[in-house]
Image: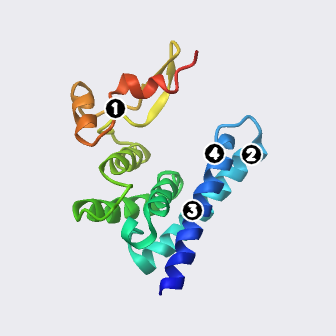
Amino acid sequence: MAHDVSALTAELTDMAATDHRLAVGANSDNPAERLSWRRSTARHGDRLNEIMDEYGWPTAELVGEEAARAAWLIAQHADRQLDVQRRALQLMQQAVSAGSAGSAGPRELAFLRDRVLVNEGRKQVYGTQIAGVKDGAPVPWPCEEPERMDELRAEVGIEPFDEYVAQFSIA
């Protein structure tokens, strides 16, 4: 079992590294780069589903902080596999509630929850998902309670929306 877990830790970390490397192609003008990104996220989503079958949510206690965060990233980017995202959200919610999610905690859970809601065509809660840019400023997908967005963000450790989007603003 210990060998399996160390192999799983390495595998999750490697998948996240691949994700980071290919993510630049997600919105590329180059169709081959977009396709490479889609194939990678689909492969990773399928593998995460298998991992969840065998281990449940890969918590920090099981695989370490870095690999637990990698699992969250893989779920976050499994946009064309809503079933995988929903399952990851449910298992991660249980881990966070039990206090065993490690570095993938309430903040990451909020990002995944918003991602699932947006992918379901529903309003998000925390304003973490950006719909586009208007007049040079990022605009979030519609939120359930836009007037409470920053308050809800603060509850899970996410900076205020304006500070968050300043990281992405087009100079």
Picture quadrant of residue 98: bottom left
Looking at the rendered structure, the secondary structure element under dot 1 is: loop
Q: Residue 137 in the image: x percent, y percent?
A: 48, 18
Residue pointed to by mark 1:
159
Residue 127, disc: none
Query: N-terminal of the two: label 3 or label 2?
Result: 3
Q: CA distance from mark 3 to mark 4?
A: 15 Å
Q: Earlier in the sequence, mark 2 or mark 4?
A: 4
Give coordinates of residue 93: x percent, y percent: 29, 60
Question: Which label lies toward us, 3 or 2?
Answer: 3
Disc 4 target residue: 23
Q: Amino acid at mark 1?
A: Glu
How far across and down, in percent of the image, does residue 127 sit? 35, 34
* Disc 1 to disc 4: CB gap under 8 Å: no
Between disc 1 and disc 4, the foreground one is: 1
Left or right, 99 with reference to 81: left
Distance between the alpha carbons at the discs numbered 2 and 1: 32 Å
Mark 3 = which residue?
Answer: 13
Q: Amino acid at mark 4?
A: Ala
Label 3 and label 2: CA atoms lie apart by 22 Å
Q: Determine which residue is flagged by label 2.
A: 33
Residue under the image location 67 percent in, 57 percent down: 39
**Quarter of the figure with the C terminus:** top right
